[in-house]
Image: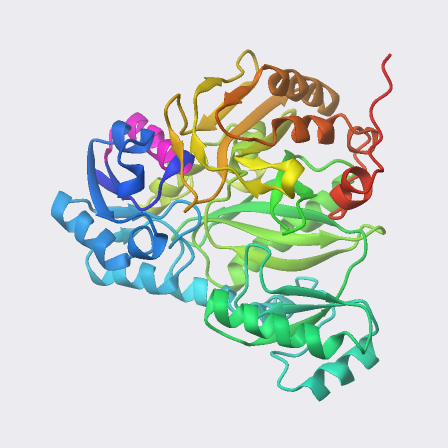
Amino acid sequence: MFKKILIANRGEIAVRIIRACREMKIKTVAVYSTADAESLHVQMADEAVCIGPPAPKDSYLHAPNIISAAHITGAEAVHPGIGFLSERPSFAEACEACGLKFIGPSAASMERMGDKSAARETMSKAGVPVIPGSAGAIATEQDALRFAQKTGYPLLIKASLGGGGRGIRLVQNDEELPRQLELARAEGLTAFGSPEVYLEKFVEEPRHIEVQIIADEHGHVVHLGERDCSIQNLRHQKLVEEAPAAQLTQTQRNRIGDAAVRAARAIGYSNAGTVEFLVDARGDFYFLEMNKRLQVEHCITEQVTGIDLVKTQIMVAAGEKLPFVQKEVRWDGHAIECRINAEDPERNFAPSAGRIEHVVLPGGFGVRVDTHIQPGFVVSPYYDPMVAKIIVWDKTRAGAISRMNRCLQETVITGIKTNIQFQQKIINNAFYRRGELTTDFLQRRILNGADVPVVAG
């Protein structure tokens, strides 16, 4: 087992990893930008190294500085956390070349899933259902029009190297296609360094269901069940997640779990990952993408399975076999996570930077809060606006919703704007409470005046 791990990240996920390492008696090294010098992860780690100024490209995305920090402190492994360099094959390769174990999948398996159009082909060959789409990247506008006329509208244009909801354009007809194609290519080039795009049939009113998998380096792959992540903002970023997914039959649950395992096996995957699917109104599911890292919402899977995913990641990276097989995984109860963001819902969810004055976080039975904030913490405009995750568990979905409502009522964060009240609006919506979730839930049920509150009594 490792004696010292460097955590190449910040915020609540860095704190989460430090806590797991402490329980495993592993020393930790935090890295930080000058904007994060007083952050909680810096205070909690055994050692901390400044790696640059606030801009991510000069600090948390600056691989040479991170690797240098690992060598200076004698770390044996690097945990990339979530975001930043966590899905960069080049960073995984650089770590390995410099004698550091990368706590995540191999660069080769990341590359196999990094190009989404190529990943579709791999999944199709592995027997994983895929959404009808173009065979590889679209070369010309004429090719796009031919595909559209054959498949029909609506269609999605997607950046081949996209992620995080970026590089996606919805097209309704031939007239819109050339302009949206141009915009998607430009966004793909700016955000991901490649203008390549592919086309995909748009699945109307789908649910976004993802399956957590964990695999060791000895060929064992296990899925830990699914999560419903359909509640997303207009930028396709998740707001509320739950496990298990409501309104899935046991047969559907088994089929989608088996498909996720096949997907991981097809690329020789190891460590933690998430296979994402769209589920249509008939219950048919289609491969969407694979996230080659830990997910923000991993906590709800931990709550219903009792499996610590971060510890398991570290064990797998150290060469150990998974301590369980598929038939030993058990699911109990229902868990929900609400992401608390520093943003103003009244101003189109604009980020809200500033100094936090006062913090009251919820507690009690079945409640977990993952956060890095405290009074005096300065929310920087440079980073993701999420400041906390409230996670609740109960034996039933209705009980978990009730507990989450109570927790949101208890939560107080002053000095900045947050989405706490907006989250209350979501979970008190009658459609949400019935489990009628689709990826356009916010537009249909909340933002367009269709908010239907729960009737008292």
Residue 453 image position (x, y, % from top left): 82, 26
Q: Which image quarter holds the N terminus? A: top left
The one nearer the camera, 6 or 414, is 414
The one nearer the camera, 375 or 266, is 375
User: What secondary structure is the stretch in magenta mostly built from?
Assistant: helix
Q: Is residue 120 left or right of residue 456?
A: left
Measuring 22% from the left and 54% from the top, which residue is drawn there? Answer: 65
The one nearer the camera, 96 or 214, is 96
Q: Is residue 199 left or right of residue 75?
A: right
Magenta span has 22? yes
Residue 371 image position (x, y, % from top left): 44, 28
Q: Is residue 27 left or right of residue 292?
A: left
Measuring 73% from the left and 48% from the top, which residue is drawn there? Answer: 439
Rendering quarter of residue 165: bottom right
Residue 449 image position (x, y, % from top left): 83, 38
Q: Is residue 254 above or below residue 358?
A: below
Q: Is residue 61 above or below residue 438?
A: below
Rendering quarter of residue 169: bottom right
Q: How is the image coloured?
A: rainbow
Q: Can residue 118 be seen in this snapshot?
A: no
Measuring 21% from the left and 44% from the top, which residue is drawn there? Answer: 50
Callout count: 0
Q: Can residue 182 be seen in this snapshot?
A: yes
Q: Which residues make up the magenta segment?
A: 13-28
Measuring 25% from the left and 41% from the top, which residue is drawn there? Answer: 5
Magenta span has 192? no
